[in-house]
Structures are given as structure tokens and as C-alpha cells.
Image (cartoon, helix red, strand yellow):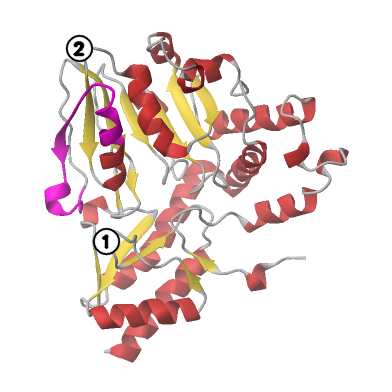
Amino acid sequence: MSTTTTRAYNFNAGPSALPLEVLEKAQAELVNFQGTGMSVMELSHRSATFEEVHNTAIANLRKLFAVPDNYEVLFLQGGASLQFTMIPMNFLKEGQTANYVLTGSWSEKAFKEAKLFGEAVAPISTKDNKYKNIPTDVEVAATDAYVHITSNNTIYGTQWKQFPNTGNTPLIADMSSDIMSKPVDIEKFGLIYAGAQKNLGPSGVTVVIVRKDLLENANGNLPTILNYKTFADNNSLYNTPPTFGIYMLGEVLKWIEAQGGLAQVEKNNEAKAALIYDTIDNSNGFYYGHAEKDSRSLMNITFRVADEELEKKFLQEAKEAGFVGLNGHRSVGGCRASTYNAVPVEACQALADFMKQFQANNQ
């Protein structure tokens, strides 16, 4: 039986909405997966049954995201935050610099970790503009081991529309909050990483897509579990992986394919975001966005209500009306609607309608 009527309008920034069809399939298979008499959570990660789940998820990710053969697809743990550490450990060598483009809090955190392992610089930052925009270009030095960007900024609601050209210097991107929300030219990147809990599944799985030649030239004298090559050489099965998370990720990938693939998903996301942005832009200043228009995110719509007391009232009434997760990040306040892949257009339409009615009632 469908649980549609009891579902909240979920605009949480993460963990975030999952496709209802995926949740219902997982519910149906929870205690007896493919006739095994066990849940997928109970399967041995060395079993043929789980290996098929694991390999199918990797194959489908490769297919949907058009990942070239000279890249590895890895499933890790520890979230993007562990990647902040693993990247400089593996790729920042003596005599080199790590180049970080600062566009928000998460790029700041990544930069902070890199400085623990070597020389890290941040020649470009939009902090002076309160992280309202994405830079138009990057600066690359001959000594740069890599250039690191955050493709979408959940807290400030900004997103790279065109990725920078870094030449022979590997471009590394934290895509935690917009991975697989649109087609991407993977060959622009040396490494992409993303926590799954925005667009790809539940929390617990971290996807890493890394060019093989980078692995071959990475630092070798590392703890085994912090070496990317460990996971590449063992099909991400060196130790027990997050089996349920990988199963769910695989089901979300099947759902993305059923939507028509990433090109259609991008169109859906543009349409959903437009419903809310248009409401903001047509409110005559009652609502106003944080991000500059040419840097606006399709995943995280950040905005304020012009009057602080009305903003509190807006958030309270929205909560009472069944909207979840509209409070802005605790570090900046305001309002935020996260419209990830699995957030249905009906939820975005309902929010736009609520915003218009709230304005009409409070002007």
C-alpha cells in the first residue's frame, strides 16, 4: 500500500528525500531479499548475492554518469569529511601546493584539512561577498598538485554552472550536494567525491570517481585504509562496506534511469527550482534570495523574508502546514529549500503556493 498520503514535504538539506518508489521497494524486500530468507543487511558482503548488488550499482553509476574506462568508481565510508583528509594524504607531495577555491563553509573545511598535510593555498575566495557568488575563473600555478572546488554550496545556495579549465592540473570536486543532478563531463576532473545522502541514497556511502593514473602516482606510504588504491584493488570490498546503503544507492540509480536519465533529471530540477525562484523574484522584495542570480543553485534555494519577525512566523506556519527542513543552516539562519532529485515537483509547487499565500496574508 502506498504511503503517499502520509508523506511530508521534505526539503531537508541532508539526509534528504528519497524516491518513494525506492523506499517502498526496500520495504517489500526488507526481510527476504531475492528469496534468500535474509535482509540485504544480513547478507555476507562476500556472497554472490551481494556481489551482484554491488557490481550492478557500480555498472549503473558508470552508465548513467558516462564514466570513462580510465576512471575507478569506489564506494567508501566516512562521508565527504574523510575525503577532505584522504585527498591531500594521497595526492599532495612535498614541493607542491594544494589549490582550494573557497566558495562556502565546506570548501573552508576541506582547505583546513589540507593544511595539516602540506602547503595549501586559497588564491580565490568569495567570502568577502558573503559567499553569494561563484567565481568566473581559477588561478593555477605550476606547483599545484590539484585544484579543489565544491560544485554546490548547500549553506549559501550557490552552484558552479561551468567548471573551470585547469589544464594538466587535476581538478577535484566535492559534488556531495549535486552529484547526478545533471550530466557532467567526467573527463574534466581528476577526482569527484560525494556523500550519498543528498541525491544518491541514505547516509553512509561515499562515492569516489578517480582517474587511474592519479592512483598510480599517489603517495604510497599511507595507512592501508586511507589509501585509495586499497579500495581500487579490492573493488571497494577490502573491508565490510555499508551494504544496505549500497543496495539503496543501486535502487536510486535504477530510479534515475527510469526518469529518463540525467538529461531529464536536470530538466526536472530546473523546473522545480524555477517554481520557487520565480515566487521569490515576483514577491516585490517580500522574499529575497541570498545567492546572486547567475550563481543560484538548483539544489539548495536560500532566501529570507524581509521582516525578521515575519520570517519566524513563516517558518512556524510552514512547519504546521507539513513542510520539513525549511530553516536555513544554523550558521547563517534564514530559509532554505533543498530540492534534490527525489523531491517531487508537487512539493515544490505546494511550497510556492504556500509562499504566495503567506505573502498575501501578511502584507
Q: Residue at x 41, y 67 (%)?
A: 326
Q: Residue at x 40, y 73 (%)?
A: 352
Mark 2 is surrounded, within 10 Å at the Cα level, by few (under 14), some (14 to 19) or many (20 or more) other residues, namely: few
Q: Position of residue 24 (x, y in %)?
A: 71, 56
- Taking depth in this image into account, of 209 and 76 the one nearest to the observer is 76
Q: Is residue 173 visible?
A: yes
| Mark carried by residue 332 | 1
Q: Residue at x 77, y 26 (%)?
A: 47
Is 54 above or below relative to 176?
above
Q: Position of residue 236 (x, y in %)?
A: 59, 24
Is 109 above or below relative to 273?
above
| Mark carried by residue 95 | 2
Looking at the rendered image, the quarter that the C terminus falls into is: bottom left
Relative side of 178 to 264, left or right: left
State the separation of the CA atoms marked 2 and 1. Answer: 37 Å
Can residue 24 be found in the magenta stretch?
A: no
Q: Amino acid at mark 2?
A: Gly
Relative side of 314 to 35, left or right: left
Relative side of 140 to 211, left or right: left
Q: Specify the quadrant of the image occupied by residue 252.
A: top right
Can residue 116 be found in the magenta stretch?
A: yes
Q: Position of residue 259 (x, y in %)?
A: 58, 49
Range shown magenta? 110-133
Disc 2 element: loop
- Taking depth in this image into account, of 229 and 342 the one nearest to the observer is 229
